[in-house]
Amino acid sequence: MKRLLWIVLALALVAGAVVFVFRVRSGEGAERVTYTYITPAKRDIRQTVAINGTITPVLSTDIRSEISGRVARVLAQAGDEVEGDQALIELDQSVLRAQLDEARLGVTAARLRTERAELEFRRLQSLGERGLVTEKERKEAEIAYRLAKNDTASQEARVRLLENSLAKSVIKAPYAGRVLSLAARPGMIVTGADSGRDGATLLELADLSRLRVEASTNEIDVAALTLGMPVEITFESVPEARASGRITFIAPAATRPAGAAASGNAAREFPLQIEIEQSHPRVRPGMTARVHIVTASAQDALSVEHNAVFNDHESGEWFVFVRAADSLGEPVKTKVELGVRDRSHVEIKSGLAEGAAVSLQRPPAVKFSQDK
């Protein structure tokens, strides 16, 4: 009797297991999904790229001295507006003026020596024609005359160099602009370019009437950008400020960010320059700018939320799941073609009817290549 009872229990367990497996495979044992449906709507969509950058002047110059010397006077202050060719810094000129006076006296003496050598050469040349002096004497007089002329030219060149250095002792603005920073102080000894080394920056001058944004973007977004494309610019430090501009430069090749690894997988960026056409008076160089670039747009486009669209990575195709005709079955997988997208919505160019109900959930039975 006990043996028969154990046989019955065993058969019951086997039957239960078979039923359970069958129900799981048929989906009856799975947790039922509650689907949320949305209705596609027509709206205007703008696809944008947003990047951060830094405000810089289009024209900016670090002004250094071309000659070495001591700063005698500083004629401008940081923040001053200056005109082109306006004197900014004067170096001490006393040594240069003394050297120039000496060089000018040297020119006078050299010209006198040249005049005397010429007279002697002409005299011996005349005597040589009558056979009264040797050819050697005449030739030596000619050489002395030519050397005197060369010495005069050398002294005159030295005067011109000293005059040029004297002119450079007054450092002038190369163009109209604003003094952004000033390091020069009276009494400071400066090293000029004439020493063969880069001298210290005495002041920084910039034309603030023309500003630009220097930024960079990734390899995905840069493909949608073109020269001349209009942009909108906002500023974190001046929330009420708005500016417009255009892309004036896109780097032809990517650069690796400073400090990035040298591996092939390191992020690469493409530098951009955006000239500001209409700025705000409170915008200054060095501020952070947020650049908004509209790369595509669609008017009155049929669209749905991003999370209603699913992608099969292997095929690259996009799908939505539309409510079944009987409203009770699983949503139907439907291939669609996408268009412009913004932060919230994506345009459906084809494959979806305007009145369809689209599920925000994917049926568990539908598998894509990335699910494997």
Image: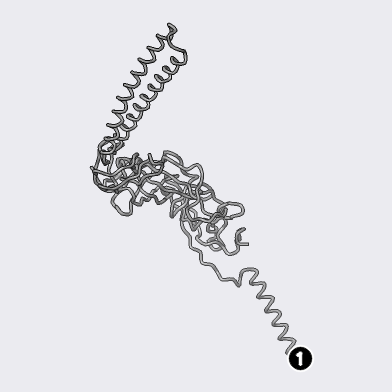
Residue drawn at the location 29% of the way across and 32% of the way down: 100
User: From the viewer's perspective, is 165 left or right of 32?
Assistant: left
Between 163 and 22, the one lying in front of the other is: 163
Give the residue number, with chain letter if any, for mark 1: 3
Answer above or below: position of 20 versus 218: below
Where is residue 151? Give x, y as percent.
38, 25
Residue 340 visible from this viewpoint = yes
Figure quadrant of residue 139: top left
Answer above or below: position of 278 versus 151: below
Where is residue 178? Give x, y as percent.
27, 43
How many C-alpha atoms fall within 10 Å of the one at disc 1: few (<14), some, or many (≥20)? few
Between 123 and 85, the one lying in front of the other is: 123
Residue drawn at the location 25% of the way across and 40% of the way down: 82
Amino acid found under the numbered disc labelled 1: Arg
Residue with the most extreme bottom position: 1
Between 286 and 139, the one lying in front of the other is: 139
Where is residue 313? Give x, y as percent.
59, 55
